[in-house]
Amino acid sequence: MHWTLSRKLILLTALPLALVFYFAWMDLASSWAHLQRHVSLQQQVEVVDALADVAHQHAVERGLSAGFLGSKGASLGAELRQQRQQADASEQALQQLRLSHKAELAPRTQQALDGVVTRLRQKPDIRSAVDNLQGAGVFAYYSSLNEEALDTEDLLRAQVFDVEIQRQLQLRLFLDWIKERAGQERGVVNGVLAAGKATGAQFAGIENYIHEQERLERMLAQLADSAFLERYRAATGDSSLSGFYDTRRRLQQQEAQLDAIQGPTPAIWFEAASLRIAALADLVRDLD
């Protein structure tokens, strides 16, 4: 076959052009995949944020419900009604994200979110019981709800591909769990101080919440940088919250006298414990 000069020129031109188009297409495909990964990451973080807020707002509602029940309805009624609105707003935000991101979420994640939503549907009955000063099951409900929300948050965190963002989310999850256990400790101790006595199960539960917070703090220390650890210790340490830690230590020393527990009034304890929880919440916001 005789190749004319023009054919040779066309061939010499076509091959580089084909390569240019090929590599351009590969680059475009890579860029598109990169964009899709970042869109997916943003959606995951949005749902993580919503789950964390659900756990936080309902932990606050749990604390106010405990105070309302402890006062036999005499105090914290207005604050509780206002907090319920905040908790409902967090639930609505989660519902909206769950529906809008349904196609992008893994089936296991969607199933976990369905479990959180199912738990939230029980909330009207719990609130009605609180309003009628019936406290049975209230503490357990909010604790189960928050634990399920935080477990789902952890499930989503594990799916994040960016190493640094995953580290930040893990730090925040440690803080969220510490804050949750601190809220549980506050609630049980409040009931013990109100009664002036404790059962063995209550005392063991308090010890368990304290030990779990200490374990989580050790894990946080392994992951956080020195600057964050310094802020954490300054915000939540004994020097900042001496009233809280004094009461905790005093209570731990009374295992042999559970029928006659000594300590501050429930209101004083509640305020001291709430200051620590607020400090933890501020640290969470610092990570956002």
Image (cartoon, rainbow, N blue to C red):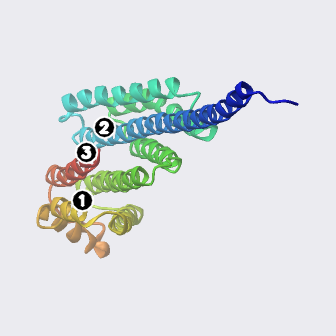
Residue drawn at the location 57% of the way across and 31% of the way down: 104
Crowdedness near tag 2: few (<14), some (14–19) or many (≥20) residues, C-alpha within 10 Å: many
SS for tag 2? helix
Q: Residue 85 lies in what quarter of the image?
A: top left
SS for tag 1? loop
Q: Position of residue 270 (x, y in %)?
A: 20, 50
C-alpha distance separating marks 1 and 2: 24 Å
Name the N-terminal-most of marks 3 and 2.
2
C-alpha distance separating marks 1 and 3: 36 Å
Q: Position of residue 143 (x, y in %)?
A: 42, 46
Q: Are marks 1 and 3 in contact (CB under 8 Å)?
A: no
Which residue is labeled 1 in the image? 196
Crowdedness near tag 1: few (<14), some (14–19) or many (≥20) residues, C-alpha within 10 Å: some
Using residue 51 as the reference point, say whether residue 8 is left or right of it: right
Q: Residue furthest right?
A: 1
SS for tag 3? helix
Which residue is labeled 2 in the image? 61
Name the N-terminal-most of marks 1 and 2.
2
Amino acid type, mark 1: Gly
Which residue is labeled 3 in the image? 285
Query: In this view of the protein, which residue sits in the foreground, 25 or 12?
Result: 12
